[in-house]
Amino acid sequence: MKKIKEETNINNSNNSNEMGKSKRFMKWTAVLLYIYLHVFGIVGLYFLFIKAKWMTVFYFVFLITISSIALTAGAHRLYAHQTFVATWQLRLFIMLTHTLAGVGSIYNWVFWHRVHHKYYGTDRDPYNHKKGFFYSHIISNLLSVPTDIKKYSKDIDMRDIESDGYVWTQRKFYWILFILFGFLLPINIAIEYWNESTINSFLIIGAARLMITTNISWLVNSALLIWGLKKGDKFPVDDNSVFFLSKSYWLNYHYLLPWDWKSDEFGTYETGFNTFIVKMWRELDFINEMKTATSDDVREALYKIATSKMTMKEALEEIKANSEEVAYKEKLIFRH
């Protein structure tokens, strides 16, 4: 036992030393880019309410809605956590609408989100919640990749993402796709089809839209600090924020069982707009093998932890294995 503890301590000290060598630097080009995006975006929101045509308003909401779906139900639930399996038609739709969001490729988004979950709450966590909302939501997205990026890559399994042809295509031709399909085409549609002014279309459909989709993407990684509960918090939270924000433990649950398709990105469970979209996809037969945890599975796992030598990690893996088995059986039943 002493030998094992000594080896563990040595490994831990080595890990901490390796983490200490990892450095991230401020990308000042990105800082300037996002400053300009938010300045023009705020002006665009003003123009949206004051000068835009009604068709532009509806078009603006539509683009943000489908981009949000691609970021949450698509990049997050489908690709990052594999909470369900999707048809090729849906994966193509998600790839195109994710490109509209202008937040980088699905591959990069998934990679850093998986790093976030694997090293959650540690110095290696790129969106470390312990450093506060400003760091998690903004600063973390303005920093360069860690100097020991090769070590990150070795620990993150991306084989499932690399085998997806649509993700590969988007990653390979991302900037061409984004400039043509994600930026110029949406702006030109408003100008061409209902004679919106060029300046309105650029500021609203260009800047304001991308400002909002960028922050939605960032919120997926920082939402715990807004909608999640901290240790010792009451439910509902005993302060004025309860009137504006619906806080719950469901976001904390997501970090234990990230593969549960019912976990909403912004603090609810089995409810919310994006969860409704996932349910609609199921009814339209666009997705199957939807993984979720049942109360019985959780109770049984807790019982085994309390009465045997089963660890929490082993219990969570057993719950996941049970959910995958049930999801596959439901798929077979549905088809036949």
Image (cartoon, grey):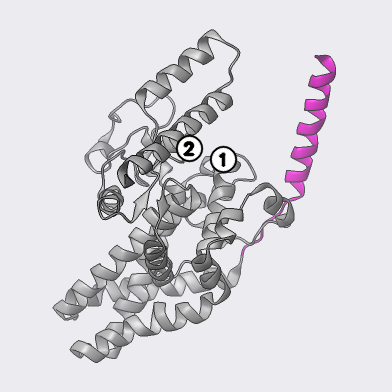
Q: In the image, what residue occupies the spot 47% across and 17% down?
A: 302
| 17 displayed left or right of 161 | right
- 60 vs 106, left or right, is left
Residue at 44% over, 75% down: 36
Point out residue 68 in the picture as x, y percentages from the top left corner. 34, 60
Task: Kindly identify the residue that appears in the image at 38 percent across and 54 percent down.
Answer: 72
Q: Tag 2's secondary structure? A: loop
Q: Residues within 10 Å of mark 1 (few under 14, many from 20)?
A: some
Spatial separation of the CA atoms under disc 1 and disc 2: 8 Å
Residue farthest along the left direction in this orientation: 54
Query: In the image, residue 77 lies at what x, y percent?
Result: 42, 50
The residue tagged 1 is 120
| Vertical position of residue 122 compared to residue 154: above or below | above
Q: Main secondary structure of the magenta part?
A: helix
Q: Secondary structure at mark 1?
A: loop
Whether the magenta-drawn stretch holds residue 5 is answered as yes
Up the image or down, 199 lies above or below 316; here it is below
56 relative to 107, above or below: below
Q: Where, quadrant-wise, is the N terminus in this rendering?
A: top right
Amino acid carrying mark 2 in the image: Tyr
Query: Do the residues bearing badges 1 and 2 touch, measured as CB atoms within 8 Å?
Result: yes
Pinpoint residue 264: horizontal percent, then vertical percent: 34, 44
| Residues shaded magenta | 1-26
- Compare residues 123 and 238 and report the one nearer the observer: 123
**Of labels 1 and 2, the one closer to you:** 2
> Which residue position holds label 2?
255
